[in-house]
Amino acid sequence: MRAELHAVLADAGSHLIEKPAQSPGADLAQTRKREREVAEQVQAVAAARDRIGEVGDRLLAVKERTSEIQSEIRRLSENMDPIYEEIGGIAFDVYRGNPLVDQEYADIFSALIEVYSELSGINAAVADQQALLEAKPFLEKMVIRGRIALLKNRRTTREGSFRRLVRGAGRDIMETAFVDEIGDPKLTAAAEPYRDRLKGARERESDLVVAEEERHALNEELEKLGAAKRPHKKLEELEEDLLTLTRTRDAILVELARAARDIPKEDLPPKCRTLFTKARKLDRRLDALAVISDRVQAALDVERLEGDTNRLATEIARKETRQAELKKEIAALKREKKDTDLRLEAKRQAQGSAEELLSPDLLNDL
């Protein structure tokens, strides 16, 4: 109920800030000034907290977007070999049919020309050996078939090298102006998938630069807000500060409301009248509860003190009983001591002089 009264008075104080009323017995200007200062601090801390949260959320979104862009760039750059091979194959055919190509391009195709020529020679040799098979006897056919097998194995190896060189040529060609200068429709069409991917990758790279710039700007903002290293910890600190400031502001509003309770009702904002009426009812209920609480506390104290009194009475009785027993024991000890003293005196008389008893002459007299 005290918390409810505190809240009611704080609410009333907030209306007195919005629509001030002058108290005849108190200067409320300083109280209002303190409230405005704390309110500004509350607003600043809340704004910083909210902004750190927004920046943190945006950083997560930028991080996710960056990962997506990087994945798209990897996807666009993956599995390019079929595209390069098609471009390189068509470009090589175009090159072989156009002997006046610039030397720059001739260097790209020189290794291909060499392997292509070697493959042509191997194919011719295979054809020659196969032509000899029908006219030769069995044993010679076996030898010829062995030569053909070796030639085919060699051709397979060189065909693998040829495809690799074709892909390399396709990749190198797309870094030059060959496709545009030649203007071959088939070659242009084969280059389109590469150009589409390149365009997409460049667009994604531009997006990546934008994302990185935003990430850098957001991190700088976090640094200015004091949350660069541990934003979650900073948010916790701001929440604690906000709670403390809010309590301080509520306390000032309550102080303002209490100071204004002697203002005539007609001079108060309408909302304050209702709140002050409610506050008075709460005060009366709290006073009544305080009386009941005091009586309950008194009853508890009575019960506790009665228990203490009974405990002390029991302890006194126990000690008094023990005291009587001790008196009897002391009297018995005194009687025993008296008897012992009498026996001691008798024995001393029987002993006689101690010096005489210890003297050497005592034995000589015997």
Image (cartoon, rainbow, N blue to C red):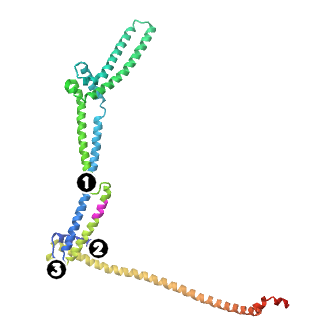
Q: Give me the residue at 44% from left, 6% from top.
A: 137
Q: Is residue 278 visible?
A: no
Q: Residue furthest right?
A: 366
Locate residue 280, reporting x and y percent: 23, 77
**Foreground: disc 3 or disc 2:** 3
Q: Give, as a single range, the part of the protein colored magenta.
A: 236-242
SS at mark 1 in the image: helix
Q: Earlier in the sequence, mark 2 or mark 1?
A: 2
Q: Are marks 3 and 2 in contact (CB under 8 Å)?
A: no
Please state, as top left, top right, bottom left or bottom right, where the C terminus lies in the image: bottom right
Q: Which mark is residue 2?
A: 2
Q: Is residue 335 above or below residue 73?
A: below
Q: Residue at x 30, y 28 (%)?
A: 82
What kind of residue is marked 1? Glu
- Residue 319 visible in the current orientation: yes
Mark 3 vs 2, N-terminal side = 2
- The image's mark for residue 24 is 3
**Quick check: 123 above or below 82?**
above
